Image: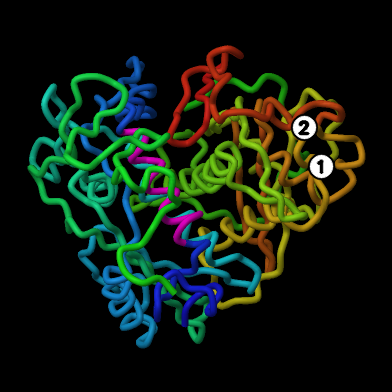
């Protein structure tokens, strides 16, 4: 069974709708390709910052084409994912060697938007370049090195496949098994170039920044990607008939309850806790919490979020990347130990702001990851359900008394530190996240509308991660 509108597919007998193709798949992939073409893609940005190094950018790409949608490739992908869905293959039992393949559980309680979930998974496939660097970079070419005794770029293979300058077309498909509990989705993208192999060139380096499309019949579009000259003003087309951290100042008050009534995920040798000395959750869980936040902040910053009226919200000039803060995590943990039924009221506006969620578990043993995805979705979805700051991005006192406040806290531009904890309390789960500097200040801007990332340096918020539309502030 497919997810989405069945009567508005991009290709005849396809599975992807026009909106999914244009606004999610092609936008996410081509945005990353445009960043490479412009020579502004950081190479392992977060890894370099952690090691105290000055972040380096990859050189500009030569002849980086704007990918077009291929109905033939979509059909190939459709055949494979539907074979998995027909058998309801468990994600943990499925061994698919494809580079751009994803499978996971979704929608444990019937609320999560699965299409948004898939775009989030694709975002995570494209984002490892922000934390892991490509090692084979010189003045002539950027190559994929793969996994060897000296390098491990296995986490970048899907990214490198989708970024190959030799690729001209892409097709993706997805299917679900709705009889499984929780439900399962399968997603696959195929390019006409095929899977990248160790030693393959991702792209040739251009001599200068700017328009670098010198193949016959090509010209640059407004993003710097190469398109056929006759199509420079057209929307994305198809090829066949279409049907980490710094201090956070004063912290939230600690709970006085010493006896823990809550069960926390903990850590293990398989999933260790090395980020923080306080090891009640693993680094994998921390990364998942951080990624689910920054993905949504990125889509907002890039102007890809619609509000309750259906209008697209403006992009953000000053949206910060959220870094993990161990002290905030510990505060969230201490708050959850007593299994609270509601969030705390801040005695001071200078204290970290908190999002809180409690929900009865209705599915069969959802994973901690499932529970976090559901929680974050619940915090974010009011932007599409109730009135919020809208086009002005101005937060009012009235907003503090509606559910929009959880969305604005997650998407408050000036916040750059976060820490969360999650626990089971009998048949319920609870999660709390703290943000600093705190948001939801009446009369203030949630973010400054304008070109994404354009005021990062002006406002002293650190360099811009252009592919994410986020500023990197380590203040």
Image height of 28 relative to 8, above or below:
above
The answer to whether 304 appears left or right of 228 in the picture is right
Could you tell me which quadrant the C terminus lies in? top right
Range shown magenta: 21-36
Residue that lies at the very extreme toward the front in this rendered image: 230
Q: Real-space Cα distance between discs 1 and 2?
A: 9 Å
Q: Are marks 1 and 2 in contact (CB under 8 Å)?
A: yes
Q: Nearer the viewer, residue 331 or 2?
A: 2
Q: Which element carries disc 1, helix, strand or loop?
A: loop
Disc with the residue nearer the chain's start (1 vs 2): 2
Report x, y in % for residue 173. Answer: 37, 70
Q: Residue 64 bears which disc, if any?
A: none
Circle 1 residues within 10 Å: few <14, some 14–19, many ≥20: some
Residue to which mark 2 is pinned: 253
The reply to whether residue 211 is visible in this rendering is yes
Figure quadrant of residue 34: top left
Mark 1 — residue? 344
Percent across and percent down for residue 450 are 63, 28
Q: Is 31 drawn above or below residue 24 in the view shown?
A: above
Left or right: 185, with 109 as reference point: left
Is 428 colored magenta in this rendering? no
Kindly identify the residue that appears in the image at 54 percent across and 79 percent down.
7
Viewer can see residue 261 = no
Residue at 18%, 28% (x, y): give it: 205
């Amino acid at each position: 069974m497919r997810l989405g509108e069945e009567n508005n597919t991009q290709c005849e007998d396809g599975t992807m709708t026009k909106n999914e193709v244009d606004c999610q798949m092609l936008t996410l992939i081509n945005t990353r390709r445009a960043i490479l073409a412009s020579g502004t893609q950081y190479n392992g940005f977060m890894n370099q910052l952690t090691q105290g190094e000055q972040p380096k950018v990859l050189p500009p790409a030569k002849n980086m084409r704007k990918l077009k949608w291929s109905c033939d490739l979509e059909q190939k992908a459709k055949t494979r994912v539907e074979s998995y869905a027909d058998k309801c293959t468990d994600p943990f039992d499925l061994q698919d060697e494809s580079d751009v393949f994803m499978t996971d559980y979704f929608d444990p309680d019937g609320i999560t938007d699965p299409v948004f979930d898939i775009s989030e998974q694709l975002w995570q496939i494209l984002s490892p370049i922000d934390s892991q660097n490509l090692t084979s970079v010189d003045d002539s070419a950027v190559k994929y090195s793969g996994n060897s005794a000296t390098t491990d770029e296995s986490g970048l293979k899907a990214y490198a496949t989708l970024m190959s300058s030799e690729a001209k077309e892409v097709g993706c498909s997805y299917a679900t098994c709705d009889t499984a509990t929780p439900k399962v989705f399968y997603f696959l993208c195929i390019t006409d170039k095929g899977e990248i192999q160790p030693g393959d060139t991702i792209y040739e380096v251009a001599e200068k920044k700017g328009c670098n499309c010198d193949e016959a019949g090509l010209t640059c579009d407004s993003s710097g990607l190469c398109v056929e000259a006759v199509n420079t003003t057209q929307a994305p087309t198809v090829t066949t008939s279409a049907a980490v951290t710094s201090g956070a100042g004063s912290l939230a008050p600690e709970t006085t309850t010493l006896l823990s009534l809550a069960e926390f995920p903990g850590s293990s040798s398989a999933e260790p806790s090395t980020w923080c000395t306080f090891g009640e959750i693993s680094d994998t869980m921390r990364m998942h919490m951080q990624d689910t936040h920054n993905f949504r902040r990125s889509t907002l910053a890039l102007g890809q979020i619609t509000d309750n009226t259906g209008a697209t919200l403006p992009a953000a000039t000053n949206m910060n990347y959220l870094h993990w803060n161990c002290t905030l995590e510990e505060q969230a943990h201490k708050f959850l130990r007593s299994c609270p039924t509601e969030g705390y009221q801040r005695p001071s506006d200078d204290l970290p702001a908190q999002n809180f969620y409690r929900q009865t578990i209705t599915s069969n043993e959802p994973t901690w990851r499932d529970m976090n995805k559901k929680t974050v979705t619940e915090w974010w979805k009011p932007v599409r359900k109730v009135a919020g700051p809208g086009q002005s991005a101005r937060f009012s006192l009235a907003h503090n008394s509606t559910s929009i406040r959880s969305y604005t806290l997650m998407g408050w531009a000036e916040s750059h530190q976060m820490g969360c904890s999650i626990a089971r309390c009998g048949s319920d789960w609870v999660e709390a996240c703290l943000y600093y500097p705190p948001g939801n200040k009446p009369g203030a801007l949630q973010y400054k509308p304008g070109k994404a990332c354009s005021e990062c340096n002006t406002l002293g918020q650190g360099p811009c991660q252009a592919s994410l539309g986020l500023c990197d502030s380590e203040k």
